[in-house]
Image (cartoon, grey):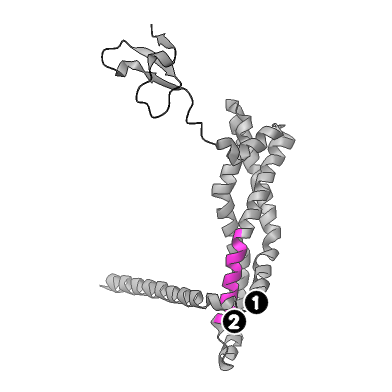
Amino acid sequence: MHFLRELWDNVREFVTTVGSVALFFGRVLAQLPRAFLRPSLVVEQVHNTGALSLVIIMTCGLFVGMVLGLTGYDLLQRFGSEEALGTAGALAVVKELGPVVTALLFAGRAGTALASEIGLMRATDQLTAMEMMAVDPMRRVIAPRFAGGIIAMPLLTVIFIAIGIFGVQLVGVQQFKVDAASFWSQSSPVSRTPLPQNGPHVQSASQVPGHEPVLVVSHSSPGSMFASPQNGPQVQSP
């Protein structure tokens, strides 16, 4: 019985906490459009959360890219595919490591700084004093910091990705002498364009009833069901 009562208390406390966080987040979103009516506050918070986090973002991005380049080169050289280091590094940094590591660093540096600042303002009754002067702390303190974080976070992610790819290039091209042209061409999306649709088509004529197993190569359009033997050479299978 005591176990059930304790379990019920824990569940109720968890639901209460989640509800409080949801209500607080809803109030912040409601005040967010009004925060942009005072752009000076938002710009100040972008500086506090974004510009002051550049050192740790760029340092970690450089070392993450260098470690990724070292590991990727060691793996790819076993298969003779060192030229694909650009593709592997770009995909890993852009899709996986860039956003995740930037979010962790942002929460560790800017998030703790904002939480301690607001906690100090609550402990010294500064928020209460604002309420006494008919100033909404949610609009004056919380919403500008939230807006600054929203603006700074994507910019920090882009910087982390750029520095990370540079770190991969620093190890792959400068240290292990991977061809620079191949590295950057593999890193760009242009190298991953789809193949042309009107290229040669290879079909097996064994699917056609009444024919011997032959291999038909033709330059017919993609809409044709079977290639015509007159439009290309026929290779008789042994």
Residue 162 against residue 7 in the figure, above or below: above
Residue type marked 2:
Arg
Q: From what the image shows, is residue 100 above or below residue 152?
A: above
Which image quadrant is residue 156 in? Answer: bottom right
Nearer to us in this view, 94 or 1: 94
Q: Position of residue 137 (x, y in %)?
A: 56, 83
Residue at numbered disc 1: 41
- Please identify the quarter of the rendering in which residue 157 is found: bottom right
Instruction: Give the percent coordinates (x, y) of residue 189.
Output: 58, 41
Q: Main secondary structure of the magenta part?
A: helix
Q: In the rendered structure, are the residues bearing label 2 and label 1 in contact, judged by CB atoms less than 8 Å apart? A: yes
Magenta residues (range) = 139-154
Q: Which residue is mark 2?
A: 140
| Residue in the picture at 69% in, 40% down | 169
Percent position (x, y) of residue 141?
A: 59, 79
Kind of residue at badge 1: Leu
Q: Is residue 82 above or below residue 54?
A: above
**Left or right of 12 on screen, residue 179:** right
Q: Position of residue 134 (x, y in %)?
A: 56, 92
